């Protein structure tokens, strides 16, 4: 992909961070804004939401002993997971994690760096995680990975505001003219393909076309500029009426953060369940740490953390 295209992607990403942060939030809604993870301890804390708040870069960026690129939908797990890994492997205390869309992370690996505003990050990952199919495709294209391990599964759900004011009963309702949809962007979000498959199961190509073409053109379908974190925020702020998301994102907002949202279940015959895979990079800068973290991802402590946040075990 050309450098011009890369710049457009990164500009869209950065613009999305500002849009998602600012949105239409009023003073009474600022507690909805990310980041939703506890900040690191120590040092002087400087954050001025929504203008200076970094939600998808975690931990120690200077001389890390382990660098992990996580698919963005696992942002809620990162804090607990990293702390548990540090406890079980105390030799690793400086850990850096990114939770950006997997398509952006893959381009970061290809180009060698990520540019965010005035900051350039040129760290190479030791571990890359995303959907099982995406890992297989990247391996076929680039041969990046030395070893892989499946560690979680996740079905889809529909997130709506508390009380379900638009009476969304299922995927077919997302094709209605009066329902504003927040949809992951197919350019860098693997979940978009999964959701479109579910649209076709529920309403054929006509439903997929309605949501992903006609409604995108008229503005009633919004394509995210960051990742899954943007959709719940739009529902909370009243900018979208419904958002197809991984079930864990609806669970996190409703059960962990206790936000005023509800989940509309998608029937099994229309649903898609993703399997998440962690991959150790062949050129991992910290080879032993990468091996230790990959093994940790399938350990009982790590699996318990994923269960805490609503993820299913890697095997049915």
Image (spheres, rainbow, N blue to C red):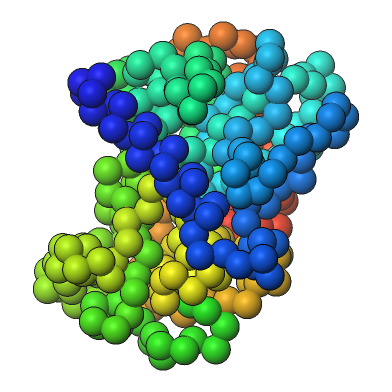
Instruction: Identify the residue at horizontal 76%, vertical 35% (top origin).
Output: 46
Between 223 and 150, the one nearer to me in the picture = 223
Between 68 and 89, the one nearer to me in the picture = 68
Q: Quadrant of residue 158?
A: bottom left
Q: Quadrant of residue 91?
A: top right
Left or right: 120 in relation to 292:
left
Question: How many numbered marks appear?
Answer: 0
Q: Quadrant of residue 181?
A: bottom left
Instruction: Identify the residue at horizontal 40%, vertical 88% (top origin).
Output: 166
In this orientation, does residue 158 appear? no
* Above or below: residue 206 compared with residue 247: below
Instruction: Identify the residue at horizontal 23%, vertical 28% (top origin).
Output: 5
Instruction: Identify the residue at horizontal 49%, vertical 74% (top origin).
Output: 238
* Above or below: residue 226 compared with residue 204: above
Residue 185: horizontal and vertical position, in percent?
31, 51
In this orientation, does residue 161 appear? yes
């Amino acid at each position: 992909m050309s450098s011009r295209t890369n710049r457009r992607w990164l500009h869209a990403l950065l613009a999305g961070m500002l849009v998602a942060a600012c949105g239409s939030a009023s003073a009474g809604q600022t507690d909805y804004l990310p980041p939703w993870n506890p900040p690191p301890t120590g040092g002087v804390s400087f954050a001025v939401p929504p203008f200076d708040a970094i939600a998808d870069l975690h931990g120690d960026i200077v001389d890390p002993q382990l660098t992990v690129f996580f698919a963005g939908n696992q942002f809620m797990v990162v804090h607990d997971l990293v702390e548990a890994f540090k406890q079980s492997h105390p030799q690793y205390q400086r850990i850096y994690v990114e939770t950006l869309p997997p398509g952006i992370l893959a381009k970061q690996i290809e180009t060698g760096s990520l540019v965010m505003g005035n900051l350039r990050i040129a760290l190479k990952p030791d571990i890359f995680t995303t959907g099982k199919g995406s890992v297989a495709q990247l391996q076929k294209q680039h041969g990046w990975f030395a070893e892989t391990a499946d560690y979680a599964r996740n079905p889809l759900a529909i997130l709506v505001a508390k009380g379900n004011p638009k009476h969304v009963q299922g995927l077919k309702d997302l094709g209605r003219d009066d329902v504003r949809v927040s949809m992951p962007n197919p350019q860098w979000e693997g979940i978009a393909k999964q959701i479109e498959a579910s649209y076709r199961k529920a309403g054929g190509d006509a439903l997929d076309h309605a949501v992903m073409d006609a409604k995108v053109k008229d503005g009633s379908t919004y394509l995210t500029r960051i990742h899954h974190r943007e959709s719940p925020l739009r529902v909370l702020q009243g900018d979208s009426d419904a958002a197809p998301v991984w079930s864990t994102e609806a669970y996190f907002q409703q059960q962990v953060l206790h936000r005023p949202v509800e989940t509309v279940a998608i029937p099994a015959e229309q649903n898609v369940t993703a399997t998440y895979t962690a991959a150790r990079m062949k050129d991992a800068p910290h080879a032993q740490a990468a091996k230790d973290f990959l093994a940790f991802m399938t350990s009982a402590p790590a699996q318990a953390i994923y269960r805490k946040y609503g993820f299913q075990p890697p095997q049915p």
